Image (spheres, rainbow, N blue to C red):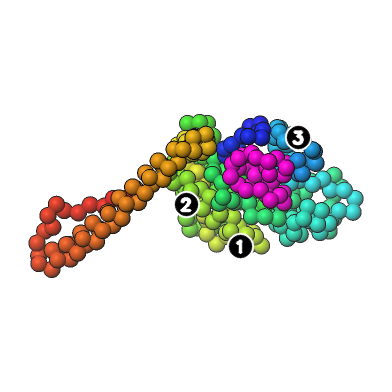
Amino acid sequence: MKELYPGDQGIWVQYLQLALQRAGQQVMLDGIFGPKTCAAVEKVMGSSGKCAVKEAQWNRLLPFLRGYITHEVKAGDTFFSIAKMYDTTMERVMHANPGTDAGALQIGSTVVVPLNFPLVSGEVPYTSLLTGWIIEGLQARYPYLQVGTIGRSVMGTPLWSLQLGNGPVEVGYNASFHANESITTPVLLKFAERLLEAYADIETFKNQQDTKPMVDQQNIQVQVDHREDVLHHQVIHPEENEQLDNHTDAREEGKNKYKKQGSVRKKTNKETKRTGGNPVGGSFDMKI
C-alpha cells in the first residue's frame, strides 16, 4: 500500500477519500491531500496532528473499500446485534452468512458483516487493485458468487472472471478490452452488484451469467498513470490550462464541422439513391 502525506495527489488519494466518505466524513474526491482530507483522517483515526496514511491506517480504512468487515462472535451476539454494532442491516448479514444458524451463533466463530453502502463506485478511476478489492467484497457479501481467473496480464495481475448461476443458458459479458474502455469495468461491476442484490434471496439463478470485468489491465494502468501526470502538470503549471481549453474548443469545432458534413452526405446519398447514381468519393464513418 502506498504511503500518503499532506500535499500528495493522485488516484491513491482518491481511494483514501472514498474510504473516508464511506466512513462518514465530508471530503471531495478530488485526489488532493489537502487540509480537509487531513482533518478527516485525524477524525477517523482518532489522532490529532498525524495525517500520514501508512500501513496501519490503510488496514483500518480497507473495509470501506472492500465493503465488509469480519466479526468474532461473543456471548449474547445475534445477527441483529451485530448488524446494529456496525450500522448495517440484519438482511445483509444473513445474506453473507448463509450456512450459519442465526439462532445459535457459536462463540469464537467468525461472521462476515457487509457494510451498509453500495460497493461499486462510479466516481473514481479503476485499477486492477481496486477491481480486486471490489470482487473480494462482492463475494463476501454474496457467497454464491463464483470468482475465478482466466489468466494474468503482462503486469502479473489476475484477469478476473465472475459467474452467477448454474442454468443451461450461458450469457457472457466482458469489459475493458482496451484502455480507453476502462469505464466499462465499473459499469459491468455495478450490473453484477445489482443482479446479486436483486436475487439475494435465491440460491440459484435460472441461467448462467459470466463476466470478465477488466481484460486489458496493463493499458488501463498506463491511462491511469497518464491521468495522474496530467493532473499533476495542471496543478504545477496552471498557465497551460488555457492552451488545453483552446485545444478542446478546436476539437469541438472539428466535431461540429464533421456533423454538418454528415448531414450533407446523408442528403447526397438520398438524392443518389433516388436518381440511381453513385455518390462521388463514396462514404466513410469516423469515431471521435
Q: Which residue lies furthest to the front in this view?
A: 239
Q: Give the range drawn in magenta.
A: 13-41
Q: Which of 18/211 is in front?
A: 18
Check disc 2 and report the residue beneath it: 173
Whole-angstrom CA distance, mark 3 to mark 2, is 45 Å
**Side of 251 where 194 appears, left or right:** right
Residue 107, given in percent of the width and then of the height, sits at 87, 47
Check disc 1 and report the residue beneath it: 198
Q: In the displayed structure, would residue 153 be above or below residue 262?
A: above
N-terminal label among 2 and 1: 2
Give the SS element for disc 2. strand
Q: In the displayed structure, would residue 163 be above or below residue 203?
A: above
Q: In the displayed structure, would residue 98 be above or below residue 51?
A: below
Whole-angstrom CA distance, mark 1 to mark 3, is 42 Å
Q: Please, what is the three-letter code of the amino acid marked with disc 3?
A: Lys
Q: Please, what is the three-letter code of the amino acid marked with disc 2?
A: Tyr
Image quarter where the N terminus lies is: top right
Give the SS element for disc 1. helix
**Side of 29 where 23 appears, left or right:** right
Residue 137, given in percent of the width and then of the height, sits at 65, 47
Tell me if residue 32 is in the magenta stretch: yes
Q: Which of 269/156 is in front?
A: 269
State the residue at coordinates (71%, 49%): 25
